[in-house]
Amino acid sequence: MKQQLLVIGAGFGGLWSALSAARLLDMHDRQDVEITLLAPQAELRIRPRFYEPDVHSMYAPLDALFDAVGVRFVKGTAESIDAAARRVGYRDEAGRPGELAYDRLILASGSQLARPPVPGLKEHAFDVDQIESSARLERHLMALANQPASVARNTVVVAGGGFTGIETATEMPARLRAILGEDQDLRVIIVDRSKDIAATMGDGIRPSIIEASNELGIEWIVDASVAAVDANGVTLADGRHIESHTVIWTVGFRASPLTEQLDAERDGQGRLHVDGSLKVQGIDHVFAAGDVAHAATDDLGNYAAMSCQHAISLGRYAGNNAAADLLGVAPTIYRQPKYVTCLDLGAWGAVYTEGWDRQLKLVKAEAKELKTQINTVWIYPPAADRRTALAAADPLIPVA
């Protein structure tokens, strides 16, 4: 009977885990391990692009790739993990329960937008967290043209001035003008709790964000938070009300709730603490990759962020090491010392930095060209060719 290596999730962490595991098995000419990937769809959803228009097209089918490398795909949603029995419970697309046994498990079930109990948030706010919710926002934006002109129709409020909030907001002026016309008086407002504009992004990148915001007409309301959302806008904690028919929530992300089913230490975002091989601390047969892993990238105190650049690398290491664990060969210790930031700033351009201190390297058109290359080429899966795909899954290939 073959040993079972199970991967939960087809995002960046899950996909690259499966490919990397297949690579190591191929290197050792082993056919006694079966790799199974469990996910709702056999597709990589290009989540870093969900703030853009035409979001319905931002996925890459994976069926042919899985066939090429010998990964078995099971279509379903994981619901439970029994670590003691080494079994995962799931439901298929028809809602029928199923169960998968494993010898090694790689949890790569990703993250989701945090939705606090803000009155009206669920009923009236939009987000760009998943392809379905981003498509809902896109349909709403297109339908604004059918509404009579008003302050509320022409105003977009983005709650949260972090990476996602900034990229979403700076894209909005062009999207709104394409829908409502060039002559409309538009407002795009970012509401952020920090006391300064883009405070969490660091001093190296802030001047570019401020310049882009000024040029694009993006307003910032800082040292503020959204207390309630209604059909006509948002009420801030200080009582101010902003009229808007389009409120977009981008505040905070948490690891998949599946992490809570493991008796293991988690960080403030729900991510599982892992060792250098990406094995969950205290559970010798479970590995974590992508947004569910609290993993040290170096020996300087830096940890992987919830980003595709880290998820791709974490997946390559987790898959390699889970397979190595089954084969009895040495793991490859996860290290990803290089960290970059490439932030899209709409029609103004983009900004590219290197290092955890975000040293500015490229701005405007040059950075935009790089951002486009990243978003349309680099983060997509390899071709459905066995040799090409397995070669691309080497954990020692730098991601950035």
Image (cartoon, helix red, strand yellow):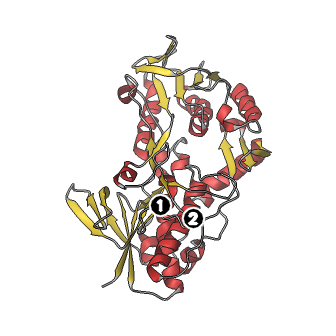
Instruction: Tell me the residue at 56%/56% (across/down).
Output: 295
In the foreground, 146 or 21: 21
Please indicate, yes or no, whether residue 380 appears anywhere in the rendered image.
no
Disc 1, SS: loop
Q: Quadrant of the C terminus?
A: bottom right
- Label 1 amino acid? Gln
Please indicate, yes or no, whether residue 288 appears anywhere in the rendered image.
yes
Question: Callout 1 environment at 10 Å: few (<14), some (14 to 19), or many (20+)?
Answer: some
Decide which of tag 2 and tag 1 comes sooner along the chain: 2
Based on the displayed image, in which of its 4 quarters is residue 43 positioned?
bottom left
Count how many numbered circles sit on residues in the image.
2
Residue 281: numbered disc: 1
Q: Residue furthest left?
A: 96
Q: In this image, 399 relative to 22: left or right?
A: right
- Label 2 amino acid? Gly
Residue 276: numbered disc: 2
Rendered location of residue 41, percent (x, y): 37, 59
Rendered location of residue 190, percent (x, y): 59, 26
Q: Residue furthest top?
A: 239
Instruction: Tell me the residue at 74%/45% (across/down).
Output: 357
Based on the displayed image, in which of its 4 quarters is residue 174 positioned?
top right
Disc 2, SS: loop
Q: Quadrant of the N terminus?
A: bottom left
In the foreground, 85 or 35: 85
Q: Residue furthest front?
A: 282
Q: CA distance from mark 2 to mark 1?
A: 10 Å
In the foreground, 183 or 335: 335
Q: In this image, 32 relative to 323: left or right?
A: left
Q: Residue furthest bottom?
A: 29
Instruction: Tell me the residue at 58%/50% (across/down).
Output: 305
